[in-house]
Image (tube, rainbow, N blue to C red):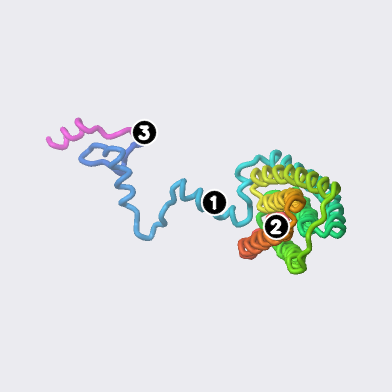
């Protein structure tokens, strides 16, 4: 009698119909969904590997990608990255041509007028030529636009160049301070300082913008060097004007040269400290060389 009632109350399901909850039947009824998931989680054995959430998987992916690619690889589409790469090449070529002309003019002013700031700017302009050439190498390979290893190598070379150039700038400025060498002022000095200051300022803005989009420390470093060149170009104008009215402030020009040399030195050392370990970390992740 009991069996008959049970069969009528709970008929046997058709074999062709899949039972939606075969593993969660409790007293002839399906357990709720939340209870089902909870029991599934409790049913895991201690030896079963722990699953990762989507957020954890993204973090792991970002960590792995960060070893060989720059952040721009996740921001820019391929055609956008190539477009910005070409712009970086054009800006670098323009920077090389312009700063090379300015370097020759500034060296001429420095030796003719005994200006430490002009010498410092001339060296900084030469450094700008070299740093722009390094950026050209950095983006010469279209497939390596997002290569972190290539980026870090360029930054290390820039760091070495910064340190060497700062030593020369500091040496010339300290020599002028020790010999009490006052700068000589004329219209040619004013012309060079104004043109160099404005040109380097424009180049610095363009490099900073491209460096931010491409997440390129090399481009940003090149922009910083152009910014220093702009400051030193205007400092020639300021120190010359001050000396014209106050001859007792003869040391201003050389002092600015010392300050700029120290800034370049500090930046170069910081760059080497940051980038040398990263070159070692990413040497096994060269995917686009």
Cα–Cα span, label 2 and label 3: 88 Å
Tell me what residue is drawn at x 30 percent, y 46 percent.
38
Q: Which mark is residue 191?
A: none
The magenta-colored residue range is 1-14
Mark earlier in primary sequence (3, 1): 3
Assign a secondary structure to mark 3.
loop
Q: Nearer the viewer, mark 2 or mark 1?
A: 2
Q: Position of residue 211 (x, y in %)?
A: 67, 47
Q: Residues within 10 Å of mark 1 (few under 14, many from 20)?
A: few
- Evaluate whether residue 144 shows in this view: no
Tell me what residue is drawn at x 62 percent, y 64 percent.
273
Q: Position of residue 153 (x, y in %)?
A: 70, 60
Q: Position of residue 243 (x, y in %)?
A: 75, 53
Mark earlier in primary sequence (2, 3): 3
Mark earlier in primary sequence (2, 1): 1
Asked if the residue at tag 3 contacts the one at tag 2, i.e. Cβ–Cβ closer than 8 Å, the answer is no
Between 212 and 112, the one nearer to me in the picture: 112
Q: Is residue 181 above or below residue 228?
A: below
């Amino acid at each position: 009698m009991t069996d008959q009632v049970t069969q009528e109350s709970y008929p046997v399901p058709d074999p062709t119909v899949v039972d939606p909850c075969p593993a969660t039947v409790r007293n002839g009824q399906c357990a709720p969904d939340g209870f089902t998931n909870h029991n599934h989680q409790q049913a895991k054995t201690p030896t079963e590997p722990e699953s990762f959430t989507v957020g954890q998987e993204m973090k792991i992916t970002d960590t792995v990608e960060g070893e060989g690619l720059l952040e721009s690889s996740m921001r820019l589409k391929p055609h956008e990255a190539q477009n910005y790469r070409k712009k970086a090449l054009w800006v670098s070529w323009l920077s090389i041509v312009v700063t090379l002309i300015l370097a020759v003019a500034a060296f001429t002013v420095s030796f003719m007028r005994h200006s430490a700031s002009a010498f410092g700017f001339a060296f900084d302009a030469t450094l700008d030529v070299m740093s722009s050439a390094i950026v050209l190498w950095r983006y010469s390979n279209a497939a390596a636009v997002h290569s972190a290893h290539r980026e870090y190598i360029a930054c290390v070379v820039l760091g070495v160049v910064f340190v060497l150039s700062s030593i020369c700038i500091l040496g010339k400025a300290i020599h002028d301070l020790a010999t009490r060498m006052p700068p000589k002022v004329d219209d040619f000095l004013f012309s060079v300082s104004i043109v160099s200051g404005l040109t380097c300022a424009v180049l610095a803005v363009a490099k900073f913008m491209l460096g931010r989009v491409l997440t390129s420390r090399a481009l940003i470093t090149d922009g910083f060097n152009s910014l220093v060149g702009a400051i030193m170009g205007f400092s020639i104008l300021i120190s010359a004007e001050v000396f014209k009215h106050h001859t007792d402030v003869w040391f201003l020009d050389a002092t600015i040269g010392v300050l700029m040399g120290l800034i370049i030195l500090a930046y170069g050392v910081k760059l080497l400290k940051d980038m040398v370990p990263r070159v070692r970390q990413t040497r096994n992740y060269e995917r686009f060389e």
